Amino acid sequence: MPEGQQPILELQGITKSFGGVEALRGVDFALLPGEIHGLVGENGAGKSTLMKIIAGVHTEFSGRFLIDGQETHFRSARDAHAAGIAMVHQELSVAPDLTVAENVFLGNQPTNALGLVQWRRMAREAGEQLARFGIDVDPMSRLGDLPIGLQQLIEIARVLFSGARIVILDEPTSALSPPEVERLFTTLRRLREEGTAIVFISHFIEDILRVSDTVTVFRNGRKVAETASAATSKGALIEAMIGRGGEVLEHSYTDDLMLPRPSDSSIVLKVDQLSLARSLKDVSFEARAGEVLGIYGFMGCGQQELSRILFGKLKPDAGTLAVDGKPKTFASTAAARRAGVALVPESRRAMLFHQEPVYKNISISILDRISSLLLKPAQERDIAKRQVEQLQIRPPVVGLDLGMLSGGNQQKVALAKWLTYPPKLLVLCEPTRGMDVGAKNDVINIVRDLRAKGLAIIVLSTEPETVLSLADRILVLKRGALVREFKNEPVSKDRLLEAA
Amino acid sequence: MASSETAPAADQRTRSLASFLRSQMRNIAPFLTLIFLSAFFAFASPSFATIDNLGNILTQVSVTGIIAVGLTFVILCAEIDLSIASIANVTGIAVAYFTLQESYVNIPNIPLPGVAAILLALLLCAALGLVNALGLTVIGIPSFIMTLAMMQIAAGISALLVRGQIAYKVPSLISTLGSGSIGGIPWIVIVAAIMLLGGHLVLTYTRFGRYVYMVGGNREAAEYSGLNVKLILSSVMVISAVCSGIGGMLGVAHFGSAQQNEFDTYLLDSIAAVVVGGTSLFGGRGGIGNTIVGLFVLGVLNNGLDHVNIDSFLKILIRGVILLAALIINVYAQHLREKAAD
Ligand SMILES: Nc1ncnc2c1ncn2[C@@H]1O[C@H](COP(=O)(O)OP(=O)(O)OP(=O)(O)O)[C@@H](O)[C@H]1O
Ligand SMILES: [Mg+2]
């Protein structure tokens, strides 16, 4: 930390617990104007909790909280906002039913003398702001209709251009593909020049090292290290995060990786000439038992739609599906599940019940296997306990409401739902999004286990690393069409990006 | 030093107690309301707090209770059924329509054996519920609109069946259950209790009950979990209609007559019982236990107001104000719960 500069924000000895769980223990944290401060740590380490304290979401904690050297206590997020603090939450917090323009101006729409919203002005200004950020979208479209990555970009844009002097980004890049990430970083650097203080949380250590000036490492509710980014390395950070050698855990996939010979085991899924409005054009492929098929593409390339069609949530305009050689037209997701297809969508909110305990979240998809009429809660809990243990979900309490888990742990629960009775075909969208390096590695191992058991697995992702770490064969989807297949040949991050 | 260590700990404990109470607001508030109202009326009128009057209250809420069982399922799924009272009415009329009436009743009806009359009436209400279900799930009409239309349709069928007349006779089984009693306890109270208990058991201990809560808690997640959401929504609409139908048949026997617009007040009362009891209008929270408390709040209020000496027109206003307060608590409890999760 440069000497002599007054921190814009300073926290001293912050302790916060939820019920009996201590999420933060005596954390000191300081933020300088014009710095980008990276924050890393395992799932559940307390990163989001600390940021929510800064943003006035959690108002009950102990410790000192100073802004510009003045002791302050926020009573709500609105207080924090008034003090110039804006945050992009890990869980999207957009209003899906409002228009893009309304979301950009959420809470401070331009009004005329009569207090009426000036729609045209709002739409124009929202369009301009988004264009500055390289987003080309109709400001009057409903936000919920846009792909999740675009929603995330719009939320980021809103916060970045809100004029805040402290900007907090909690895993902002998790739904973005490389070009958007680049644009985000350029914008962050510009804001830094203007004196904005930025906190940036991510599980992509390389990104953190590239964009931040200082990095702070959290572990188990404590701050365990704070260093200048230039003075540390990926391995050292990972070691500080999880307390063991990190290099083995994280590949960077810049070198060529050899894909195996295609398997000739039985075809589990055959997709023929699938088309959907403007999203998919004549998509045909097959997925085989005991093989992980990766589908890579940029945001909005049609991955999301494809996964929904496979699970019976969307109906294609044309084309056919066959599972185990039998043609299928899924009338509902229930039909798809019965046919042995399972989906983990990219959005946790879409598949988890936040107000229900963990065990009910894990058992919901398999209830008909464990009970015909009456529920068997003891058995449900046992099953959930096994999954929680296997996936190392923290805290390991199956009776806790799901909403109390950290983001990465929720993601694990989403996966756990399908693992007790493995399906024939498992479709995973962004399976490692929001997971720390250790957890990513766990997921890789789980997927390999399932592959060994003979499941057909499809991994769809906008992160090259995810696809490269998991897939045996890779398809590249570009604007709704399959443009390239990698099999039995060398592949790398660059080759994938080039194809997309 | 030691004291500064323990102070925050004690502080934390009171805070977590406070946040527990906040998250339980939905269940606590209706209960406190009930205790408060009972104490108030017991104090204001010597005739209120008697065993006899307790019996009155139980009998008075029975029909509402039977209808509210099905409505609880619907509201737990974050849907609404506005046709409950009309369906109760038409089912009550139908069972009379298929029963031999006295010669002075001038309705061109079709007398059948009692069992057949009851079965046909049940079939009718189930069919109307099925129409609600299909409108909601297959065509995609919001339940608010669909059941509003059904309210009219059922009223129309009632009108066609009785044509402005009044029928009196119902099958003997129905008249026993509606107006008879055993060992001093009215059968209708027993039926209501059994149905409430049945509803509770289904919601708490069966797989279907779990699905109802999950669909109400997060419909999208239910769909991504591979549940047949349309089937579950359809089932609750049919359950609601059948409960209404049973309430209607017993109600007709209880009142001693079957006629048009006989159940109009039951729409508001049933919705009020469910919501006042604390079942969330947003779905996924609450249950039959809440409905029972809500029924008692309503029953004590209606009955108690008759025991104190106030303007009978004012009573309507008071009921309205209490309902409003309950609705505010219902919506507020949702926010508190979300806050308590922090
Ligand atoms: N609302 C809550 N109620 C109870 N416990 C909570 C709540 N929010 C967080 N926790 C707990 O606090 C701890 C820290 O969670 P936090 O969300 O800060 O982790 P994180 O570092 O952001 O992890 P991730 O990388 O998974 O997002 C976890 O053990 C979590 O279960
Ligand atoms: Mg987090």
Image (tube, coloured by chain):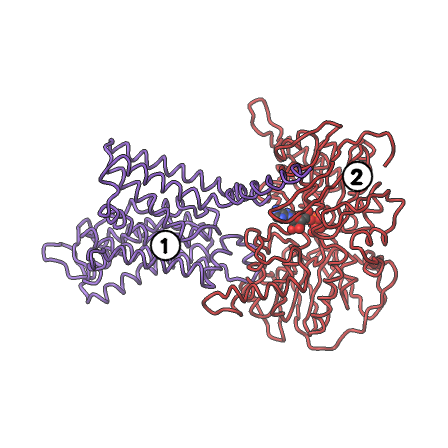
Chain colours: A red, B purple
Question: Residue at point 46% right, 45% down?
Answer: B26
Q: Which residue in the rendered view is the most extreme toward the bottom?
A: A265
Task: Tell me which chain the residue with mark 1 is part of.
Answer: B
Q: Is mark 1 within 8 Å of ligand 1?
A: no
B155 and A176: which is toward the camera? A176
Residue B333: percent from left, percent from top: 48, 42
Up-down relation of residue A489 to residue A89 (above or below) = below
Real-space Cα separation, disc 2 to disc 1, in angstroms: 56 Å
Residue linked to disc 2 = A188
On the question of residue A105 being in view, the answer is yes
At label 2, the amino acid type is: Leu
Q: Which residue in the rendered view is the most extreme toward the front?
A: B2
Numbered mark located on residue B69 in the image: 1
Q: Residues within 10 Å of mark 2 (few under 14, many from 20)?
A: many
In contact (CB < 8 Å): disc 2 and disc 1: no
Residue B1: percent from left, percent from top: 69, 37
Q: Which residue in the rendered view is the most extreme toward the top?
A: A113
> What secondary structure is marked by label 2?
helix
On the question of residue A145 being in view, the answer is no
Using the rendered image, report if marks 2 and 1 lie on a common chain.
no
Side of A34 where B209 appears, left or right: left
Question: Residue at point 82% right, 36% down?
Answer: A35
Q: Which residue in the rendered view is the most extreme toward the right?
A: A231
At label 1, the amino acid type is: Val
> What secondary structure is marked by label 1?
helix
Q: Mark 2 vs mark 1: give the one in front.
A: 1
Up-down relation of residue A369 to residue A314 (above or below) = below
